[in-house]
Image (cartoon, coloured by chain):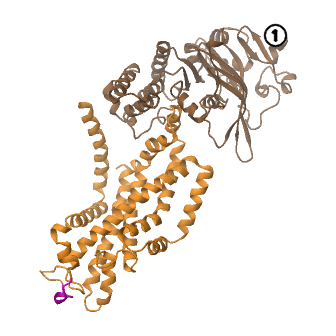
Chain colours: A brown, B orange
C-alpha cells in the first residue's frame, strides 16, 4: 500500500459540542483512513458521532457550538482543518461531496431540480455556456435514471426516492473523488433503498469515486462496503474488511451485540435480542472502555483502563478481551 | 423551446394557485379593486386632467365651489379642481408608498440577512441598532430626517424609508433564522456555494412570502406617514398636490367647505385600508399550510 493510494486520513480527531454548562464529547480520538476507490462503511448507533465525523471532513459543523479540539484530516495530503474558507469552498462539491440523510429536506423547495443541479455544476466550472450546463444536467439526470423533461419540476413534485436520486445527482455532478453518504437510504422504504444503493454502487464503479457510507443498517454494509468501521461513543472500536466483520468469530462485544440484534431468518424467535442499556451520555462518558457498563463480558480492567488495539492483519479491535493475545 | 414553455407554465401555475386562493378572500379583493382604481387614475392623471391647467393653476373666480357637474369634487380655496389635484396627488402618494417600500425592503433584506445568517457579533450589532431606531416613533424619526434634509419628494422618500428599514430588518432576520439551519442550506454549502450566493439564491426566495406581506402592509404605513409629514409642512411643498398637503390647506375652509377635507381624507383612509386588506389576504394566500 503506497501513500499515494491514500485519499483520506483522519488522525486523532477530537470534537466537542459546547453549550452553556455542558461539554459533549462527540468524537474522541478517531483514526480512520480511506484508499482511492474504496467504500468504507461507518456503522454505529444514533449518537455515536458518525455524522459529526462526516461533517467535520467538509468543515460543516455548526460554528457556534462545535469545536475541533485536536487532530488532523488529511485529504490527498492537505490538512482540511487548517485550509482557508476559499480552499474549502473549492474542495466542497468538486472533490468531496455529501449526500444528506433526508432527501425531503435537502432540496431547496423554491428552485427547480434542474436549477439546483446546474448550480452545483456552474460553481466549479465557471466557463461553461448555458447550453453546456444544460447538456450536463441532462446527462447527470440520465445517469440517476430521471427523464430529462423533469428537470423543470420542483422538488415537491417528486417522490422521496426520486428526490434522493436528485440529491445523488447533485453530489456526483462534478465527479468528486470522495462521496460522503450520510444514511442515504434511511428515509426511504426498502424497495427504493435497494434501487438507490445499487445505483450508487454502479455510479461509484463507473466514476471511480471513494465513498464513506454512514449507516446503521448492517445489511447495507455487507452488500456495498469494502471496509467497515464500527463506532461507539465517538471512537472506532472495530475496523476491518467486510469479511473480517461479518464472517470472522473474533469481535468487539459491541459488534457482536449489533449482529445479535438482527433477527435470524432460520430461527423462530419471539423477541429481538437488543444490547442492554443505552448509549452513554456523551457529556458524561464512562471511564476506561466506554462500552463497559453495557458489556456482557466486562472485566475489572475495563472499568478503569482504556483498551488498546488488538490487530490481526488489517482487522483491529479495541477491547481488553483480546489485548493479551495481541501483545 | 418546448422546455422554455414548460418552465413558463410551471411558474405561472404557482402564481395561479396563489391568485386562486387570494380571489376567495373578499376583503382582499375589495382592497385590490380600490387600489387598482386609484392606480388607474394616478397613471392616467395627465390624460384625464392636465396638471398645469387644473391641478396647480389658480383661478380665484371659481374658488370654493361645491361639487358640481363641472368640478365633480368641487374646487379649493385657490379655485383649483379638487378631483384633478386628488389624482395628481395620488401619483405622489402611491409613488412614495411603493418606492420607499422597495428601498426599505432592499436595505432591510441586506441587513436582516446578514444579521440572521452570520449571527454572533454582526447580529448583535445590527439588532441593537435596529432596536434603538425602533424606540423612536417612526413619524418622529421621519420628521427629524425630513426637517434635516428639507422639503421635496426625494427627501420625503428617504425620510420614510429610513424609518421603515428597522421593521424589515427584523422580519427578514427572523425568517432567515428559521431557514438558516435547514438541510438544503447545509447541502448547498456542501456543494461549495459561497455565503452571498446562499443568501441570495437559496434563502431569500424562501423568505419572499413574509417579505411581500410585510411590504404590502408597509405601503399603507408609508402613505400615511407621507401624508402626515406633508400635513405639517415637512413633506411635499405647495403648490404640488399631495393628499396631506391638500388636507392641510383645506383645514382653513373646514367650516364652509367640509368637502375639501373629506375627499383627500377619504383617499388616504381608503388607500391605507386597501393595502392592509390586500396584505392580510396575501398572507393567507402565500401560506401553503392554510390551503383551502
Question: Looking at the image, is B231 positioned above or below residue B168?
Answer: below
Q: Indicate left or right for A234 with B125 as reference.
A: right
Name the one closer to the observer, B17 or B195. B195
Q: Position of residue A18 (x, y in %)?
A: 71, 42
For label 1, count other residues whose C-alpha is less than 10 Å away and answer few (under 14), some (14-19) or many (20+): few
Snapshot quadrant of residue A323? top right
If the image is split into quadrants, where does the C terminus of chain A sit? top right
SS class, disc 1: helix
The chief SS type of the magenta part is loop
Which residue lies at the image location 48% right of the left edge and 41% below the top edge? B198
Which residue lies at the image location 52% right of the left edge and 37% below the top edge? B183
Q: Position of residue A244 (x, y in %)?
A: 67, 10
Which residue lies at the image location 85% right of the left edge and 24% below the top edge? A305
Q: Chain of mark 1?
A: A
Q: Position of residue B207 (x, y in %)?
A: 44, 49
Snapshot quadrant of residue A52? top right
Question: Looking at the image, is A33 positioned above or below residue B248?
Answer: above
Name the one closer to the observer, B72 or B54. B54
Q: Residue furthest front?
A: B149
Q: Does the segment drawn in magenta span residue A29?
A: no
Q: Position of residue A313 (x, y in %)?
A: 72, 7
Q: Does the segment drawn in magenta span residue B62?
A: yes
Q: Which residue is mark 1?
A: A326
Q: Indicate left or right for B124 with B141 as reference.
A: right
Q: Indicate left or right for A77 with B281 as reference.
A: right
Question: Looking at the image, is B276 positioned above or below residue A51?
Answer: below
Residue A309 visible at all:
yes
Question: Looking at the image, is B126 positioned above or below residue A215?
Answer: below
If the image is split into quadrants, where does the N terminus of chain A sit? top right
Snapshot quadrant of residue A139? top left
Per the rendered image, the range of residues in magenta is B58-66
Which residue lies at the image location 63% right of the left edge and 14% below the top edge? A227
Amino acid at each position: 500500500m503506497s501513500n499515494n493510494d491514500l485519499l483520506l486520513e483522519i488522525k486523532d480527531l477530537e470534537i466537542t459540542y459546547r453549550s452553556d454548562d455542558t461539554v459533549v464529547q462527540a468524537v474522541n480520538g478517531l483514526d480512520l483512513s480511506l484508499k482511492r476507490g474504496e467504500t468504507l462503511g461507518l456503522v454505529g448507533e444514533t449518537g455515536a458521532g458518525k455524522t459529526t465525523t462526516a461533517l467535520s471532513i467538509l468543515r460543516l459543523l455548526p460554528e457556534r457550538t462545535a469545536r475541533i479540539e485536536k487532530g488532523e484530516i488529511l485529504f490527498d495530503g492537505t490538512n482540511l482543518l487548517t485550509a482557508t474558507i476559499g480552499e474549502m469552498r473549492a474542495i466542497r462539491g468538486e472533490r468531496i461531496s455529501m449526500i444528506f440523510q433526508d432527501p425531503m429536506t435537502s432540496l431547496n423547495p423554491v428552485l427547480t431540480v434542474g436549477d439546483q443541479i446546474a448550480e452545483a455544476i456552474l460553481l466549479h466550472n465557471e466557463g461553461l455556456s448555458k447550453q453546456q450546463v444544460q447538456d450536463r444536467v441532462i446527462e447527470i439526470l440520465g445517469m440517476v435514471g430521471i427523464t430529462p423533461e423533469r428537470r423543470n419540476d420542483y422538488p415537491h413534485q417528486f417522490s422521496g426516492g426520486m428526490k434522493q436520486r436528485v440529491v445523488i445527482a447533485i453530489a456526483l455532478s462534478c465527479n468528486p473523488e470522495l462521496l460522503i453518504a450520510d444514511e442515504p437510504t434511511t428515509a426511504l422504504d426498502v424497495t427504493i433503498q435497494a434501487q438507490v444503493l445499487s445505483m450508487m454502487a454502479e455510479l461509484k464503479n463507473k466514476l471511480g469515486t471513494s465513498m464513506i457510507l454512514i449507516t446503521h443498517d448492517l445489511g447495507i454494509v455487507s452488500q456495498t462496503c469494502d471496509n467497515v468501521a464500527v463506532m461507539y461513543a465517538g471512537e472506532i472500536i472495530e475496523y476491518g474488511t467486510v469479511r473480517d466483520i461479518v464472517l470472522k468469530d473474533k469481535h468487539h462485544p459491541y459488534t457482536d451485540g449489533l449482529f445479535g440484534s438482527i433477527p435470524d431468518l432460520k430461527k423462530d424467535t419471539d423477541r429481538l435480542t437488543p444490547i442492554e442499556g443505552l448509549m452513554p451520555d456523551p457529556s458524561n462518558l464512562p471511564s476506561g472502555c466506554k462500552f463497559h457498563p453495557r458489556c456482557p463480558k466486562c472485566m475489572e480492567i475495563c472499568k478503569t483502563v482504556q483498551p488498546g488495539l488488538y490487530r490481526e492483519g488489517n482487522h483491529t479491535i479495541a477491547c481488553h478481551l483480546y489485548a493479551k493475545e495481541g501483545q | 423551446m418546448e422546455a422554455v414553455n414548460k418552465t413558463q407554465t410551471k411558474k405561472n401555475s404557482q402564481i395561479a394557485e396563489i391568485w386562486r386562493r387570494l380571489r376567495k378572500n373578499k376583503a382582499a379583493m375589495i382592497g385590490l379593486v380600490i387600489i387598482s382604481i386609484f392606480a388607474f387614475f394616478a397613471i392616467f392623471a395627465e390624460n384625464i386632467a392636465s396638471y398645469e391647467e387644473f391641478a396647480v393653476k389658480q383661478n380665484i373666480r371659481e374658488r370654493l365651489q361645491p361639487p358640481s357637474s363641472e368640478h365633480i369634487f368641487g374646487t379649493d380655496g385657490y379655485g383649483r379642481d379638487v378631483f384633478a389635484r386628488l389624482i395628481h396627488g395620488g401619483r405622489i402618494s402611491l409613488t412614495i408608498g411603493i418606492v420607499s417600500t422597495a428601498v426599505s425592503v432592499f436595505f432591510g433584506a441586506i441587513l436582516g440577512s446578514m444579521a440572521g445568517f452570520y449571527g454572533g457579533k454582526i447580529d448583535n450589532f445590527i439588532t441593537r441598532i435596529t432596536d434603538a431606531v425602533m424606540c423612536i416613533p417612526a413619524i418622529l424619526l421621519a420628521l427629524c430626517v425630513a426637517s434635516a434634509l428639507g422639503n421635496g419628494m426625494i427627501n420625503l422618500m428617504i425620510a420614510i424609508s429610513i424609518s421603515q428599514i428597522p421593521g424589515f430588518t427584523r422580519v427578514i432576520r427572523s425568517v432567515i433564522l428559521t431557514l438558516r439551519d435547514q438541510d438544503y442550506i447545509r447541502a448547498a454549502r456542501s456543494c461549495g456555494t459561497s455565503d452571498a450566493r446562499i443568501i441570495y439564491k437559496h434563502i431569500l426566495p424562501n423568505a419572499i412570502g413574509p417579505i411581500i406581506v410585510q411590504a404590502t402592509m408597509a405601503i399603507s404605513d408609508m402613505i400615511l406617514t407621507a401624508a402626515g409629514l406633508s400635513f405639517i409642512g415637512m413633506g411635499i411643498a405647495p403648490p404640488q398636490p399631495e393628499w396631506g398637503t391638500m388636507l392641510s390647506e383645506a383645514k382653513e375652509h373646514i367650516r364652509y367647505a367640509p368637502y375639501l377635507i373629506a375627499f383627500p381624507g377619504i383617499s388616504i383612509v381608503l388607500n391605507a385600508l386597501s393595502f392592509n386588506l390586500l396584505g392580510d389576504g396575501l398572507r393567507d394566500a402565500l401560506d401553503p399550510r392554510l390551503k383551502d
